[in-house]
Amino acid sequence: MNFIIRGENLEITGSIREYVEKKISKLERYFDTPPASDVHVNLSVYNDEQRIEVTIPMTDLLLRGEEQHTDLYAAIDLVIDKLERQIRKYKTKVNRKFRQKGAPKHVFAELEREANSVAVEEESDEIQIVRQKRFNLKPMDSEEAVLQMDMLGHAFYVFQNAVTDETNVVYRRKDGRYGLIEPNA
């Protein structure tokens, strides 16, 4: 794994870098061959809250974890736990799918290349739609969409952008601010 560690409002010392690399390297035990991907780690400090974001893009699989804590080392431990749960959940889904088809148990390493489609199929087997809603998209700007979202008390709002005439989504972020999702042209 190639580590790319970045700090915001925080100096990355040798001990912090060593601790992050040591902890994330423990994830390699879940793979037959260590992934040759970059590991993006963002460490930041805001208002005495230590925050860590870890992104590990692999072939057809994206591991991502984000945690906040008053202690940086505790935040690192929490995000590693979250990534381990993601890997175990993913391995369980892939292995369950192939046990049902009669394949051997040790398929995870072979399936890294084609696992995305298997994971999507497995997820679709477990997802149950309990409500379906249809509505007309009203042309508006993003500020009006945020106001509509807040009035409804929702965490996101789908609308037609009056300027671009495309479907957009506004959403409330964990930090209380807002985000906008636009399709690629």
Image (cartoon, rainbow, N blue to C red):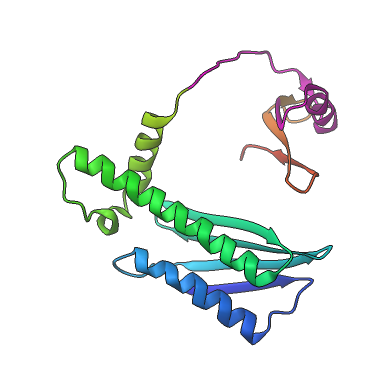
Image location (x, y in percent) of residue 37: 45, 67
Q: Which of 14 and 49 is in front in this view?
A: 49
Q: In this view, does 57 lie to the left or right of 17?
A: left
Residue at x 25% of width, y 56% of height: 110
Query: Does residue 18 appear in this view?
Result: yes
Residue at x 67% of width, y 37% of height: 182
Q: Nearer the viewer, residue 90 or 137?
A: 90
Q: In this view, does 159 lie to the left or right of 95?
A: right
Image location (x, y in percent) of residue 33: 31, 69
Q: How many numbered dots are placed on residues in this image?
A: 0
Q: Nearer the viewer, residue 90 or 74?
A: 74
Q: Quadrant of the C terminus?
A: top right
State whether residue 154 is above or below residue 67: above
Residue at x 52% of width, y 68% of height: 39
Residue range corresponding to the magenta coloring? 129-158
Q: In which quarter of the image is the N terminus?
A: bottom left
Question: Is 153 contained in the magenta span?
Answer: yes
